[in-house]
Amino acid sequence: MADEMQRIALARRPSGDPVPDDFELKTETAAEPTPGEVLVEVTHFSLDPYMRGRMDDAKSYAEPVPIGGTMTAQGVGRVIKSNADGFSEGDMVTGMTGWASHAVMTAEGATRIPEGVPPTAVLGVLGMPGFTGWYGLNDLGRPKSGETLVVAAATGPVGSMVGQLAKAHGLRTVAIAGGAEKCKMAEELYGFDAAIDHRAHDDASSLRKALAEAAPDGIDIYFENVGGKVLEAVIPLMNTFGRIPVCGMVAWYGGVEDASDRLPMLWRSVLVKRMAVTGFIIADHWDRFGDFQKDVAPRVMNDEIAWREDIAEGLENAPQTFIEMLKGGNTGKQIMKVI
């Protein structure tokens, strides 16, 4: 008997920030795995800011989700039918499942989750978000003991990884987060030396003054994943030969304001201070994933790296949870529990 499945499809292209009507819950018959494939019953999947970009029909580093197509996501689940060598029913695996209750994966696209590893950890601290922070800091930030690092969205899965690794390298770490609760978490859970609530500052000038107090020796590394007024506040405080790894611009995902009047300030600073500003897409660097896991997995299992998850339940609630996440409604790695 064929399995029934549900999925969240893209109903229309958003105009600005996504709204519930941009999504549609569909009920269908699950596909049967062909030779070399497995059918997975999804237990959890990840919600990440990059998914907002996939909703637009615009040229980017990845193809957009087509209208009627399943929203993209990495997920974890249990193999319920196997037509692939090396996989058996009951195996816990991870791969690109989409926002769905079931997914067919190729043997190459499915990775078995090792015994003892919490399945949801591969969606966050030991998965793409953690890897993004590790690679961006180590390979592009090139941290040195005694330097100062600033990271925005500091309590998210990327920012919290960056902060903790930088602290282990001997850097002064400054968090930027939204709200007093997140600032407290940044200091108490993730060990940042200082935390600044960007919501307490109406403009870049006010935020810059607070940053200058928290980073009296200037900023050597700014890990950029937000953009907006935070970037504008940081640039004048960057030190000569500063590094800015850029992995996201969540403040502008719903539409970019005209910032042409601020471009001269940005590019003059890049030139005069000889800064290295490097954009990166983590999918280009999977050759480093094994090194990341060797370095970070033991630290996670030994409780040397703190991590937190926000788990929302119900596939049908994924759109609203995603919308709230883009507005900063989560405090940890946002994950959807399907079953």
Image (cartoon, rainbow, N blue to C red):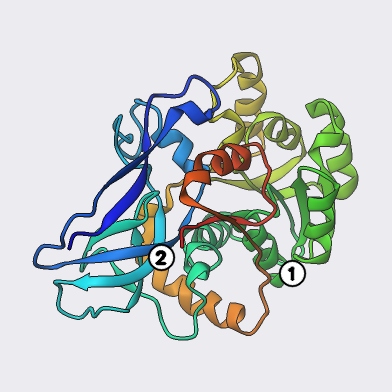
Which residue is at 83% across, 51% downward? 181
Image: 273 above or below 13: below
User: Could you tell me residue 187's position as x and y percent?
Assistant: 82, 61
Q: Secondary structure at mark 1?
A: loop
Q: Nearer the viewer, mark 1 or mark 2?
A: 2
Residue depicted at 29% across the width and 33% down the height = 68
The residue identified by callout 2 is: 76
Q: Residue 95, how many percent across, how many down? A: 34, 62
Amino acid type at circle 2 is: Val
| 243 lies left or right of 176 | left
The amino acid pointed to by label 1 is Gly
Q: Residue at x 35, y 39 (%)?
A: 61
Q: Secondary structure at mark 2?
A: strand
Mark 1 is surrounded, within 10 Å at the Cα level, by few (under 14), some (14 to 19) or many (20 or more) other residues, namely some
State the separation of the CA atoms marked 1 and 2.
35 Å
From what the image shows, is residue 58 above or below residue 291?
Answer: above
**Looking at the rendered structure, which numbered label has been put on residue 170?**
1
Q: Does residue 215 appear in the picture of this structure?
A: no
Q: Residues within 10 Å of mark 2 (few under 14, many from 20)?
A: many
Q: Nearer the viewer, residue 149 or 218?
A: 149
Is 339 located above or below residue 214 in the figure? Answer: below
- Is 261 placed left or right of 5 in the picture? right
